[in-house]
Image (cartoon, grey):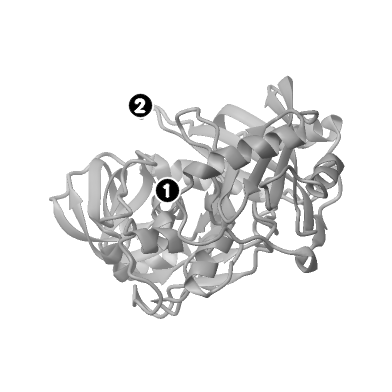
Amino acid sequence: MIDLERYKSAFASMPDGILRAEVNAERIHSTTVWIAQGRASSSEAYDQTKYYLRAGGDRLGMVYTERQDDDVLQLMRMAAENSKWVDQETAAPMHDAADSMVLSEGSAMEPVEDMIRVGQALEAALSGCEIRKLAIRAMEREMRTVNSLGFDAQMRTYWVDVTATVAMKRENMQDAEIETNQSAGSLRELNVTAFAEKAHALCDGFDAHGLSPVTIPGGRHDCVMTGQVMRNILMTAWKAFSAEAMHNGTSCFSGAGQRLGVESLQLINAPRHPVSGKVWPMDSEGSVVPETYIVRDGVLEEPLYTLQSGVRDGAGTNGCAGRVPSMTGNVPIALTTVPAMLYLAPASGTSQDDLIRSMGTGVVLTYSLDLFHSVNTASGLFSVPCGGYYVRDGKPVGSVSQMTVAGSLGELFGAMQAFADDLDFDDFYFRNYCIGSPSVLLKGLSFAT
């Protein structure tokens, strides 16, 4: 586990004027191998530990370092100085000694030789596609939080994931490629056949089954949105379910008790799910991540809480404190609200094809663009460039592209009619959280073409 003994010793004798202090350390260790033409074409290893120190009185300032040998007392003084500029309504909460715990899941990092062997099997299974990129990665993630109240929480998890960028081998078709991934707790648990089938299906859907283009009029159309498209929307839309966003007016939702959709609509945040190898049992405050129904039976039941927002609302935390790396290159220091594995619950025994037959006539959306700029979580409005294929009487008749689906998040959730059983997860780019969704049948979405 991450060594924080120097911090624990310093917390026992803090500088004058500093009443409380806490350090959260997060370590990512990964090995990645790229496979091409039956061999490892390149590889890389990454191992980095980041330390986030908070110190002060009621207000806690923050400093960040990647140096294990930095002077802890000096770091505390710097954090306490930064606390002067913290705008905070109430005293920053901390866990105490009674909440300490040790969590560990998985076994160990996988040998590179075994990663290459599995990568070769994956490449062989994907032979029906043109493979642009194939990478297999072994991951270890550690977190540890220690504070001056005697709290010490530690976590270690392992998993492997594979990512492939593939295109269909079709003549006279516009070049179209998709990226797909799968994760598992170990190499042994990776299902090579299932991954290849998934990649083929996604690629075929993205390429609209090789159908010729058709033009449909703008207006409202019923729609089956694949899990990949819904995940792309949720990758930004989840922020509207943050308790902090609801408190400060940057969420389009009002809070618990608001009806969002049909009774089959369930939005869950959890530390794990059987279809994914990733596990997120602890957040960046050292809080346990429980399974939480954010939306239950179509009603917003409980927003995403950190310690701070939970104490303010008298609700307690549900393990949603984290740090989202910004896309600008700035170092993410401040604690913020972040889910663990947030997903729309699938139905049982209902396939995507079942949803398409039930829809009859409408649009099947297989891809969307502009991942982070198409949803405004404060107003709830979204406008998503997208494409896929058109279905008439349950049968595909032609590809559609250069469309935009638009509306509000309230309308989107309200339009959800049914869910398939094909739940799948995507990581955020920096592997801070996962978003999951099955295919979804929606009634009367607004399209511009």
Using a 10 Å C-alpha cutoff, classify the residue at mark 2 as few (fewer than 14 neighbours), some (14 to 19) or many (20 or more). few
Q: Earlier in the sequence, mark 1 or mark 2?
A: 2
The picture places residue 225, in percent across and down from the top left corner, at 37, 56
Q: Secondary structure at mark 1?
A: helix
* Nearer-the-camera pick, 317 or 142: 317
Horizontal side, residue 439 vs residue 82: left or right: left
Placement of 371 over or under 406, stated as above or below: above
Check the image and name the residue furthest to the top: 41
Placement of 316 over or under 195, stated as above or below: below
Q: Secondary structure at mark 2?
A: loop
Q: Is residue 218 visible?
A: yes
Q: What's the CA distance linking mark 1 and mark 2? A: 29 Å
Q: Which residue is mark 2?
A: 172
* Nearer-the-camera pick, 263 or 304: 304
- Disc 1 marks which amino acid? Asn
The residue sitting at 41% across, 42% down in the picture is 206
The picture places residue 177, in percent across and down from the top left corner, at 46, 33
The picture places residue 304, in percent across and down from the top left corner, at 50, 64
Q: Nearer the viewer, mark 1 or mark 2?
A: 1
Q: Which residue is mark 1?
A: 232
* Nearer-the-camera pick, 402 or 87: 87
Q: For residue 75, what is the image quadrant?
A: top right
